Image (cartoon, helix red, strand yellow):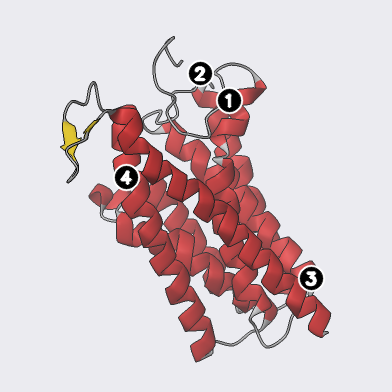
Amino acid sequence: MVEPGRRRPAFYALSPGGWREFVTLLHPPYTAWHLSYVALGAALAPSFALWKLGATLAAFLLALGVGCHALDELCGRPLQTSIGAGVLVVLAALGLGGAVAIGILGAVIVSAWLVPAILAGSFLALAYNLELFGGRFHNDLWFAISWGAFPALTGWLAQSQSIRPQALLVAFACLLVSLAQRRLSTPARALRRRTASVSGSQTLEDGSVLELDAARLLEPLEGALSVLSVAMVALATAVVIARLSAG
C-alpha cells in the first residue's frame, strides 16, 4: 500500500485499493507505447490484414500488459499494490497462456514462421521478468530487445512470413526508442521509489536560484515519458490508417 503523503510509485499509478490497483498493474501508457511497435511492424510489412494485427495486439496485450506486469509486481512489488501473490500468479498464467494460445492458433492458420516467435517471446517474458540466469536478461538492452525490437518484428512476421531489411530497420528503430525510454524511466523510478530526500540548488547566469527537489527533477523525465507514450501511439495509429487507406 502507498502510505499517506508518499509519492506514487509511478506517474500513472491510481490511488491504492480495489480495481484501481489492477489498472495500475497494466502500466497503461507503457503498454500502449509498446503495442504501438507491433502496429508499426505490421503496417510496414509488404502485406497487411487488419484481423492479423488485432490478433497480434491481443497476444501482446495479454503477454506484456497482463502476464509480464503481474510477474514484475510479484517480484519486488515495484507498484506497491496489495494484490495477492496468488492472484498475480493466476494473472501471469492467464496472460502468458492466452498469448501463447493466440500464437499457436496463428501458427496453424497463418504460418509456422510464428513458432520461433512464440518460443522467443515466452523465453524473454520469463527470463526478463523473473530475472532468470542471474539477471543476465534483466537490463536495458534486453528490455529494448524484448519490448522494442521483438514486438515490431513479430508484428511484421504475422503479416508477411519473411524477413526483409525493412523489418530489421523498424525493429532497430523501436529498440532505440525503448532504450531512450529506459534512459528516462530509470532515474524517474529511482526518484519516486528509492529517494528519501533531494537537496540542492541551480544558479542561473542571471543570478537567480532554483531550488532542486524530487518534483523538479521528476517533471522533465516523466513529462517526456508521458508525451512520448502518446506520440508513439498516435504515430502507429496514423501509419495503420494510411496503410488501410492505401488498400
Residue 82's disc is: 2
Label 4 crowd (10 A; few <14 / some 14-19 / many >=20) = few
Query: With 221 as the anchor, is 234 left or right in this view?
Result: right
Label 3 crowd (10 A; few <14 / some 14-19 / many >=20) = some
- What's the distance in space between the residues labelled 2 and 3, CA to CA? 38 Å
Pointer 1 with pointer 4, Cβ within 8 A? no
Query: With 27 as the anchor, is 4 left or right in this view?
Result: left
Label 1 crowd (10 A; few <14 / some 14-19 / many >=20) = some
Q: How many marks?
A: 4
Q: Residue 152 appears at what percent x and percent y?
A: 55, 70
Pointer 2 with pointer 3, Cβ within 8 A? no
Q: Circle 4 is placed at which residue position?
A: 186
- What's the distance in space between the residues labelled 3 and 1, CA to CA? 32 Å
The three-letter amino acid code for the residue at tag 3 is Leu
Pointer 2 with pointer 1, Cβ within 8 A? yes
Q: Which residue is pictured at 41% across the width and 28% down the height?
A: 77
When the figure is inspected, residue 171 is found, relative to residue 95, above or below; the finding is below
Query: With 152 as the anchor, is 139 left or right in this view?
Result: left
**Sequence-wise first label, 2 or 4:** 2
Q: Residue 24 appears at what percent x and percent y?
A: 56, 32
